[in-house]
Image: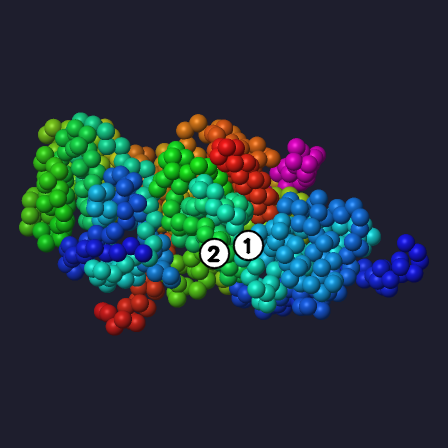
């Protein structure tokens, strides 16, 4: 490459900072459930796309759990072919509009971006979201043409990220797919868990509609393990994928957790998102927030709960986390947004008791923690500091300290190997101890991300296809 | 959508019987289990005990007392109408293997879910004594049904208008003193179940109760239905709904049941006002 060409390829002035995305003003948005970020407009998107170096080693692709060809889709954007950019993303990712919004990009594609070594990395998530939203608004829905019917029937249990991805891939390969969903609305955690202000529900229902258009049958109100056991499923279907999520909320085991005003994050978010309690009494499901709320935990679910409480009218919301801010497992953007909205942080703090009066929460007793040597998780282990006890007066406590394995389906499955309630499955194929039964997502790994569950759903679909093809012959 | 095939006023003015088409649920459901229903797009999810299961007809029976907005709306539905969502069967079936002599204690419309339970006990070879209580004769429900599946029926009314004058625990204690029992099963409002457990405790007889906690999903996901049993936290939806009544922390359950009293009243009053109801 001569000097002339090099000059033409490199933008004259590379902006070290990423193009900002417009957002609702914090003071306004903390009072509504509309989406926080407006996303990029066309001009902003093209400006940001131009920052991609198109480097040879493409670390971003390896950093993506489903291997989206990131430099290719960005190049298509730069060339002005947005439909092609969308097509490239969609070839690897069934839910781009979802992932562009909820993926922890800073730990994945953007975390390893070459540009990020010296400057701010390319805002890959925002570009992905832009392409997906553009397609929804302007594009002809590229309904994928399924292969010729194979005559094989596959059951998919759960319609969350892993189930949707697995069902989509299997349908595309020509298999007849039936999805069993326990709730009245499909989407799993995308519907009941992630709030409207971070992931509008119309995006989730849009993706579910695409699945239906491909001939996938979705049975709502169908609790696998109760309405149909795994053994019965395997008699009716040629193969099965289990993607039920973890879904058994944990409590701390401290006094006062049964008081009125104590919620699991699952319940708090389900009432709000699935049941639309924020529109009570127009919608019938109530929710109680009170004036002061404490959220225990430091992950995305904790951030979602805290910011939801704020939008439900709480005056003071405190995030109580036992390690320091540096260890917060939540997505950086959510922490940033939460702070902008006035969320209080009580770091290095452990609740020891919930105080009640007449059956209702009145406060939490806490102790400060000091961070000691690094533990197995690679983070510094917190230890209580003697004499540091203090009280936070609150009306509501939300426990967002993780989930355990739900036994509803696994308890009815003869011969399904489990480890501490989670399904034992091959990480590369999702293969379980029962021939023809595959599993992926949180019920295998424990609570993780949307994108890792999608990756597991995709791998399992490939393995199920191979399994069915070999059986056919 | 689940069609309402039959509706009748069981006990004036507000207790209704519904027979609902739900073939998949009916094929699987066992005595002691429940369903969660949602009436319409903006509706809440409420758990209802199964008061009848007919797998061959593909129907389930539900009893509803119109005490709030959702139950009021359901009471206003007619035959030929439909319920948007019926999810189930949920919870564990009652252990109805041959349990020797079983006394069923039903309070209020809690008598209705005891009908399939008593039927299953009888089919398994148990002898069944039913003890039913109400304030007065006109408020008794399911009397004929319970007579059909019981070896003996004892009725108590507060005013003595039917059976023995007194409350349900009087008749229960008398029966236990006279001939004992191997198992007592109680279904009804929490204070009634608590009273039954207090009454049976001195006799040392195993007492099973079916707990009616507030729920959303019914699959263990929300944890809203947590109850305290024997010093442990249990989820009524997946660990229950049946528990050893002598181990239940009743004050905790009764307290948790009133969590949304204010909102329930607000919602009910607004609905009644919209429909010009008293």
Return the mark for residue A317: none
Q: Nearer the viewer, residue A301 or A322?
A: A301
- Compared with residue B276, is residue B14 higher up or lower down, i.e. above or below? above
Name the residue: 64% across, 58% down.
A86
Q: Position of residue A433 (x, y in %)?
A: 50, 28
Residues in magenta?
Answer: A365-386
Return the mark for residue A213: 2
- Compared with residue A387, is residue B67 higher up or lower down, i.e. above or below? below
Q: Nearer the viewer, residue B273 or A361?
A: B273
Compared across the picture, whether A85 is left or right of A173 comes to right
Residue behind mark 1: A144
Question: Are discs 1 and 2 less than 8 Å apart at CB?
Answer: no
Compared across the picture, whether B202 is left or right of B231 comes to left
Instruction: Look at the image and tell me whether residue A43 can be seen.
Output: yes
Q: State how far apart marks 1 and 2 are (Cα).
A: 10 Å
Protein chain holding label 2: A
Q: Position of residue A471 (x, y in %)?
A: 49, 32
* Residue occupying the far right of the picture: A3
Look at the numbered disc 2 and give the secondary structure of its residue.
Answer: helix
- Callout 1: 10 Å neighbours few (<14), some, many (20+)? some
Compared across the picture, whether B162 is left or right of A470 comes to left
């Amino acid at each position: 490459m001569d000097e002339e060409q090099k000059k033409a390829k490199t933008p004259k002035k590379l902006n070290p900072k990423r193009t900002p995305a417009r957002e609702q003003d914090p003071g306004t948005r903390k009072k509504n459930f509309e989406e926080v970020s407006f996303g990029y407009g066309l001009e902003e998107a093209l400006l940001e796309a131009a920052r991609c170096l198109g480097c040879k080693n493409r670390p971003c692709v390896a950093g993506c759990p489903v291997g989206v060809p990131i430099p290719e889709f960005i190049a298509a954007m730069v060339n002005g072919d947005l439909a092609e950019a969308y097509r490239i993303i969609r070839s690897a990712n069934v839910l781009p509009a979802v992932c562009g919004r909820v993926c922890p990009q800073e730990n994945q594609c953007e975390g390893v971006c070459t540009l990020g070594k010296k400057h701010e990395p390319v805002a890959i998530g925002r570009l992905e979201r832009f392409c997906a939203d553009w397609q929804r608004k302007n594009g002809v829905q590229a309904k994928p043409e399924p292969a010729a019917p194979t005559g094989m029937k596959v059951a998919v249990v759960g319609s969350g990220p892993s189930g949707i991805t697995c069902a989509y891939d299997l349908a595309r390969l020509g298999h007849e797919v039936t999805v069993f969903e326990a709730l009245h609305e499909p989407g799993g955690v995308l519907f009941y868990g992630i709030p409207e202000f971070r992931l509008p529900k119309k995006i989730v229902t849009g993706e579910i509609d695409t699945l239906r258009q491909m001939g996938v049958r979705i049975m709502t109100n169908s609790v696998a393990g109760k309405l149909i056991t795994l053994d019965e499923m395997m008699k009716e279907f040629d193969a099965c994928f289990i993607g039920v999520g973890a879904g058994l909320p944990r409590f701390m085991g401290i006094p006062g957790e049964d008081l009125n005003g104590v919620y699991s994050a699952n319940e708090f978010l389900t009432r709000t998102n699935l049941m639309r309690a924020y529109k009570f009494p127009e919608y019938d499901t109530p929710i109680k927030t009170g004036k002061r709320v404490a959220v225990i935990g430091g992950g995305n679910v904790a951030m979602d709960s805290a910011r939801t409480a704020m939008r439900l009218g709480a005056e003071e919301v405190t995030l109580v986390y036992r390690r320091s801010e540096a260890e917060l497992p939540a997505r950086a953007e959510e922490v940033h947004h939460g702070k902008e909205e006035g969320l209080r942080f009580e770091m290095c703090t452990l609740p020891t008791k919930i105080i009640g009066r007449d059956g209702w929460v009145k406060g939490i007793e806490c102790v400060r923690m000091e961070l000691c040597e690094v533990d197995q998780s690679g983070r510094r282990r917190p230890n209580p500091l003697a004499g540091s006890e203090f009280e936070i007066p609150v009306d509501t406590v939300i426990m967002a300290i993780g989930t355990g394995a739900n036994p509803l389906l696994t308890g009815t499955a003869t011969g399904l190997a489990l480890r501490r309630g989670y399904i034992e499955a091959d990480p590369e194929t999702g293969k379980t101890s029962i021939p023809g039964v595959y599993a992926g997502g949180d019920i295998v790994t424990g609570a993780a991300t949307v994108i890792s569950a999608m990756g597991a759903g995709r791998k399992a679909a490939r393995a199920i296809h191979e399994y069915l093809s070999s059986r056919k012959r | 959508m689940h069609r309402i095939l039959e509706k009748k006023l069981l006990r004036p003015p507000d207790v209704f019987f519904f027979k609902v088409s739900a073939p998949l649920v009916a094929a699987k459901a066992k005595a002691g289990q429940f369903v969660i229903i949602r009436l319409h797009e903006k509706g809440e999810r409420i758990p209802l005990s199964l008061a009848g299961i007919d797998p061959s007809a593909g129907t389930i029976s539900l009893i509803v007392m119109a005490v709030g907005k959702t139950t009021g709306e359901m009471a206003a539905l007619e035959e030929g109408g439909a319920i948007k969502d019926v999810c189930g069967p949920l919870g564990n079936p009652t252990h109805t293997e041959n349990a020797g002599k079983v006394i069923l204690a039903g309070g209020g419309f809690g008598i209705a879910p005891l009908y399939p339970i008593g039927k299953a006990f009888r089919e398994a070879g148990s002898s069944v004594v039913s003890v039913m209580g109400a304030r007065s004769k006109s408020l008794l429900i399911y009397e004929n049904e319970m007579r059909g599946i019981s070896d003996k029926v004892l009725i108590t009314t507060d005013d003595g208008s039917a059976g023995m004058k007194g409350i349900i625990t009087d008749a229960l204690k008398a029966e236990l003193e006279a001939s004992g029992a191997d198992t007592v099963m109680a279904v009804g409002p929490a204070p009634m179940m608590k009273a039954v457990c207090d009454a049976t405790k001195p006799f040392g007889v195993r007492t099973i109760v079916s707990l009616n906690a507030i729920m959303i999903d019914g699959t263990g996901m929300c944890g809203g239905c947590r109850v305290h049993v024997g010093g442990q936290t249990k989820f009524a939806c997946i660990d229950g709904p049946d528990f050893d009544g002598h181990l239940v922390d009743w004050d905790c359950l009764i307290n948790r049941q009133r969590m949304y009293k204010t909102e329930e009243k607000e919602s009910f009053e607004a609905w009644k006002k919209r429909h010009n109801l008293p």
